[in-house]
Amino acid sequence: MFVAKHFKDLMEARPFQPFKIHLSDGSTYEVPNHEAAFVTRNYLEIGLDPDSDKIPGRLAKCSLRQITQVEELPTA
């Protein structure tokens, strides 16, 4: 099981390494940069469908208990 500190460390890493999370229901979400997600004690909230100013149109609220895998993505 992943804990908030794990994602806090990922989000604060410099240089940032993009990653994808996999949830127990089979869904996946990409976190392309350190501004795309927010960590709380029990959730990772990920901004989705960003506009040209990188402002998300909606959020995915992912329970840390449901995250089964974290996959590194190639840097741009």
Image (spheres, helix red, strand yellow):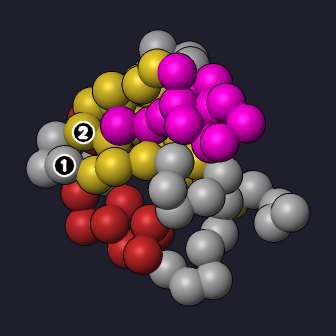
Q: Position of residue 65 (x, y in %)?
A: 25, 35
Q: Position of residue 36 (x, y in %)?
A: 51, 48
Residue 40, numbered label: 1
Lateral position of residue 26 relative to residue 58, left or right: right
Kindly state the secondary structure of the residue where label 1 is placed.
loop
**Which residue is more in the foreground, 19 or 26?**
19
Residue 18, numbered label: none
Q: Position of residue 40 (x, y in %)?
A: 19, 49
Quarter of the image containing the C terminus? bottom right
Q: Which residue is mark 2?
A: 43
Lateral position of residue 34 relative to residue 5, left or right: right
Residue type at tag 2: Tyr
Lateral position of residue 58 relative to residue 31, left or right: left
Q: Residues within 10 Å of mark 2 (few under 14, many from 20)?
A: some
Circles 2 and 1 in contact, beta carbons < 8 Å: yes
Q: Residues within 10 Å of mark 1 (few under 14, many from 20)?
A: some
Q: Quadrant of residue 61?
A: top left
**Residue sitting at 34 percent across and 30 percent down?**
62
Which residues, given as a range, are shown in magenta?
45-57
By secondary structure, the bulk of the magenta-drawn segment is best described as loop
